[in-house]
Image (cartoon, rainbow, N blue to C red):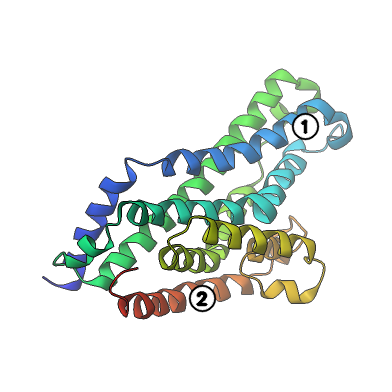
Amino acid sequence: MNAAAHLISSLAMERLKVKRTFMVWLAVFAPAFVVAVAFVAGYADGEKFYSPGINPWINFSEHILAGWSLFIFPIYVSLLSALYAAIEHHNRAWGYIYSLPVRKSSIYLSKLLVLTAFIALSHIVLLVFGLGAGQLMGVLKPAYGFQDFAMPAFTAQACLWMLVCGLGMTVIQLLISLWYESFIVPAGFGLFATLAGAIARSFHISHFSPYLWPFVFLNNTLEVQKWDYSILSKSFSLYVLGALLSIWALGRRNNV
């Protein structure tokens, strides 16, 4: 069996495992929570945010993207990866998994790809729910003018690029989650990294934190041409290098 066949086989096993977890619900709830907060704030105090004749979608999208990139996205990745790894840890299943006629590298890569797919799903949900919430706002609060404008294209672009910016912290959190049996270690580490980045975000050194890269990428502006696109290559490079390091590190252990 070649490498591709091993990976396909591992992916099939992972698909069956996640069907019995709350991972899908978390992937939907996290972005839905951000959109709900932005919707409630806009519905209650829209007069402060939306000016007549100016596209209200811009301010609404800014609230969603800022809240997601700075706080919820890193915490969500931390919880999702810890929950995913707990499937094996809680069932003491690593000995059985490593006894299967599948390469250890395929086992790890299948988990990384499934986790990445869930994170991609969350960004699709963020975009779709954001669009739906804005349209609902136009019905409930027509004075705000949502029905007179369209969601700007930068919202979809930001969701795509933030996904790429989050790949670096994704590979870090998966390694920590697989390495430590306790759910608290990866979840706590992710929470600490998120809060530390949020507190120190005004300092340049904080820009080296993969947990802050989705926020740093936006560069405090919604102007596409001013976004920090160098973050994309940094995050993707860390994703690849982190995957190789994880395969080597986890492969040297009899049990994860």
Q: Position of residue 255 (x, y in %)?
A: 30, 69
Q: In terms of sequence position, does the residue under pointer 2 or pointer 1 come before the other?
A: 1
- Indicate which label's residue lies in the foreground, 2 or 1: 2
Which mark is drawn over residue 238? 2
Q: Secondary structure at mark 1?
A: helix
Residue lying at the far top in this picture: please name it: 140
Mark 1 lies on residue: 42
Q: Position of residue 90 (x, y in %)?
A: 36, 52
Q: Position of residue 194 (x, y in %)?
A: 67, 60
Identity of the amino acid at label 2?
A: Leu
Q: Position of residue 133 (x, y in %)?
A: 63, 30
Give how far apart the Cα atoms at labels 2 and 1 are: 37 Å
Question: Where does the C terminus fall, quadrant-wise?
Answer: bottom left
Front one among 47 and 1: 1
Residue 154, can we see it? yes
Q: Quadrant of residue 23?
A: top left
Q: Is 100 displayed left or right of 56 in the figure?
A: left
Front one among 147 and 165: 165
- Figure check: 163 above or below 255: above
Q: Secondary structure at mark 2?
A: helix
- Figure check: 256 above or below 82: below
Question: Where does the N terminus fall, quadrant-wise?
Answer: bottom left
